Image (cartoon, helix red, strand yellow):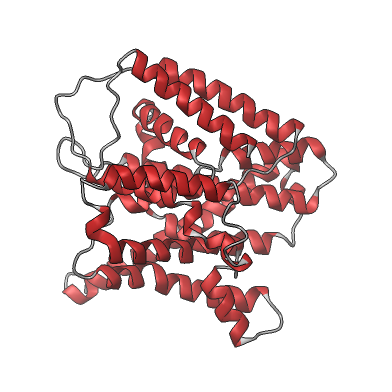
Amino acid sequence: MEWELLGIILAGLGALYLWVFQIPYSLPHPLAVTGKRENRFDILRGFAMVGIVLIHIHSYFQFFHPADKLVIHTTLFFSNLSRFSVPLFILTSAIFLRKKEGYWISKIKNLLLPYTFASMIGYLLKYNNYHVWEFIQFYCLGKVFAPFYFVPLLVQFYVFFYLFEKFLISKTFIKPILFLSFIINLASNLGYFDSILPDEYHSISVLNYLFFFILGIQIGLSNEEKNKPKVKVSLLFGSLSLILLFLIVLFSAVYYLDFKNHHLVYPIFFFFVIWEVIPNFGQTTIHWISYIGNNSLFIFLLHPFVIHLMHSVDPYFFGGPFLGYLVTLILNVGIPILIAIIIQKGKSLYRLRHSGELR
């Protein structure tokens, strides 16, 4: 609660700064001036995917070395720093969401089928006593592996958008809906719905991420303002970044608090900061982070298998805490990416053979 309220206070100060100095900052746009998809959204998803891996690496190190305070506090810092990840995925998933022909076919083909296959294999691999009803429960609640809860959460938002699309994309209602979603999300974060909702539903409650989904829709509806002056807000973002960094260090190293995934302000702040910083990255860095973002589903579904199997090996085996952390990160991102490359190459060869171009 304290982190939530601190974030809201900082956001209010930032908004006051923009208002007092009349800085005409606008929301990021899903399309570039050229009309092509803005690749910064894929880069943001890449950051979010790496962040999800960092959150789980903390649990991995804590499992083997709970008494090594310096290491565990450091891994907790990176875990707390990455708590923007799930909200950012929800937000970017909503930006390009449209109700069109094949809406559910694409969702089933690109999300539910891979998730179903991964859940079945994961259940057989992770558990010893198999029960159909238990698997159904785990599947619907995303409990086969801890990060799988994101899929039933996202599916609920897809259903919500499908049912209320006309209302959600109406320019007349979008701002009141955004404000209402913020109040509902804040109430959920502060625990006001905990006694109303079933305990099993808490982890996949849409109320925890409603604001991010609605904000993503609003960003998706925005128009590119080509003639709007470029505004430098580096002083504001730099100051707030230092404050937030200090607070994350404080909460991680001194109070040893594990942040929730669905605080309101921090993910939105990270979104805007990275949006402004991305143009300063080198092209090689942009390419690789964007590639991770484009293949985030592979990493999301396969990384839990990697980290689960690694629980039979002490992370210090890879050369101590520092190298162990680095190797764990590389393996949990690299192995799914390698599988993605193999599958994509296989698909390309299959298409070539069937098109008659390869004999």
Q: Residue at x 40, y 42 (%)?
A: 44
Instruction: Determine whether, in the image, residue 45 is placed left or right of residue 242.
Output: left
Q: Is residue 329 placed above or below 234 in the rendered structure?
A: below
Instruction: Determine whether, in the image, residue 191 is placed left or right of residue 301.
Output: right
Instruction: Determine whether, in the image, residue 291 is placed left or right of residue 140.
Output: left
Q: Residue at x 14, y 24 (%)?
A: 227
Query: In what quadrant of the picture does the N terminus appear?
Result: top right
Pick the front one: 276 or 266: 266
Res 1 seen here: yes
Pick the front one: 265 or 277: 265
Q: Residue at x 51, y 44 (%)?
A: 186
Residue 320, quarter of the rendered image: top right
Q: Is residue 295 placed above or below 277 in the rendered structure?
A: below
Q: Is residue 106 placed above or below 94 in the rendered structure?
A: below
Q: Position of residue 42 (x, y in %)?
A: 35, 46
Instruction: Determine whether, in the image, residue 80 is placed left or right of residue 86.
Output: right
Q: Residue at x 43, y 71 (%)?
A: 114
Q: Position of residue 76 (x, y in %)?
A: 68, 41
The furthest residue to the right: 67
